Image: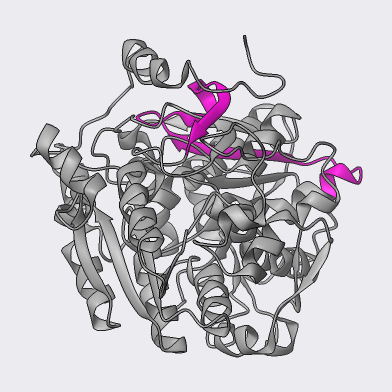
Amino acid sequence: MADTKIVLPDSEIPRSWYNILADAPHPPQPPLHPGTGQPIGPDDLAPLFPMDLILQEVSTDRAIPIPDEVLDVLSVWRPTPLHRAKRLEREIGTASRIYYKYEGGSPAGSHKPNTAVAQAFYNARAGRTRLATETGAGQWGSALAFACQAFGLECKVYMVNISYQQKPYRRVMMETWGAQVVASPSPDTNAGRSIRERDPESLGSLGIAISEAVEDAATREDTSYSLGSVLNHVLLHQTVIGQEAQRQLALAGETGIDVVVGCVGGGSNFGGLALPFVGDKIAGAEIEIIATEPAACPTLTRGPFAYDFGDTAQLTPLVPMHTLGHDFVPPGIHAGGLRYHGVAPIVSQLLLDDLIRAEAYTQNDCFAAALRFARSEGIIPAPESSHAIKGAIDAAKRADESGTSQAILFNLSGHGHFDMAAYESYLHGSLEDFELPEEEIQRALRAIEPLPKPAGAPA
């Protein structure tokens, strides 16, 4: 039997990020300038990002070295442990072996600092003194606040209004690290003011918050925009997760992995774990790779593949992705980090190429899975990660029904210590499920009808 906890020595922190674009059969189609409809170049991105990150965004090098200054901060909590969930296995009565990579031990309590630290470093080296960003559940905002503190940068966070209300201590966490946090839509930007005029009670969305942060960065010379998901360089920085997991599974005696599961909002959580295993799959390994998402925001399972804006105010380039429409405002589910209308172009392309597949779950089913995990393994999961737990349990059940024993891996990307209100609602029977009506999807998609169509998209 494998040990319950597999820990790598400090010397085993990956020294390079893994770039899936070196191995993918089809790279994502290029982002387009919203005005000209032509592919954007480095000069178009220079007002928002330092050149190091722009070059990483378009790189096809398989391995990109991690700077020593970034490794020094990552070593505070990396490598992170891989756990064999033996008690969960007994609880659900499965013959399969379930592993989870636990990212909740970082200072911010999630996987997000893996890229926040890198982005803060490159911005500081480029002479920027301030970063602006958005955050959904608060995990990304917390991570960037921590990283800005590490490299002496100011930090402004536009936090989605519903999460600002549901998770006040995430805001306090960011403020403890010196960040300025406002509820989005806010009165601080033209984008925020416009939406507040139309809907004073707006719950907000990641698309709206992105608009505000992009506007903030574009109107100040001292400020860069920092994004916690979706872009190529963000998923690149997260691949330390999957690389460590590959080594740990080998130490656990697993000669191969059968199923890899990660939850998806913008794609950083899923990509960080899954992309190194996608590389293995491209090389011939038989691995089922599952992206799990909320039924209330079913981007991969019900959204078409199209060019769309990454934000509500249409300030970003057009990116090729599965989308529910840039003006889509998801219901106020507690998995705030998964309430995004689009997804990383890399993840969308992998879905088109049948290298991954997607599943969508209701809120109550995910919390039921989270409770089984908490009561067996002891860790209270973040609502986002509960989707990965649900996916792993379902995979184990399918294996049992087929009479096989499989090795299943999922990413436990954070803890749920700031999510007790959500657990209280579930435990007291007041947690609502949201199944997105088809007419709401069609309404949101009308906004993208005039936009250019990517190759392979329906006419």
Q: In this view, does 31 lie to the left or right of 26?
A: left
- Which residue is located at x 58 percent, y 70 percent? 50
Q: Is residue 63 left or right of residue 348?
A: right
Color style of the picture? one colour
In the figure, 266 relative to 134: above or below?
Answer: above
User: Residue 424 appears at what percent x and percent y?
Assistant: 16, 51
Give the residue at the far right of this rendering.
Answer: 284
Q: Say which quarter of the image contains residue 281.
A: top right
Give the residues in magenta.
280-309
Q: In this view, does 253 lie to the left or right of 137?
A: right
Return the residue nearer the eye: 56 or 223: 223
Q: In which quarter of the image is the C terminus?
A: top right
Res. 86 visible in picture: yes
Q: Is residue 374 left or right of residue 428?
A: right
Q: In which quarter of the image is the N terminus?
A: bottom right
Give the residue at the far front of this rendering.
Answer: 36
User: Residue 302 appears at what percent x and percent y?
Assistant: 49, 21
User: Residue 328 appears at what percent x and percent y?
Assistant: 33, 29
In the figure, 127 relative to 416: above or below?
Answer: below
- Which residue is located at x 75 percent, y 44 percent? 258
Q: Does the magenta stretch include residue 133?
A: no
User: Residue 24 appears at what percent x and percent y?
Assistant: 82, 43
In the figure, 160 relative to 38: above or below?
Answer: below
Return the residue nearer the eye: 386 or 92: 386
Return the residue nearer the eye: 138 or 234: 234
Res. 371 visible in picture: no
- Which residue is located at x 35 percent, y 54 percent? 215
Return the residue nearer the eye: 160 or 214: 214
In the figure, 35 relative to 163: above or below?
Answer: above
Q: Is residue 283 magenta?
A: yes
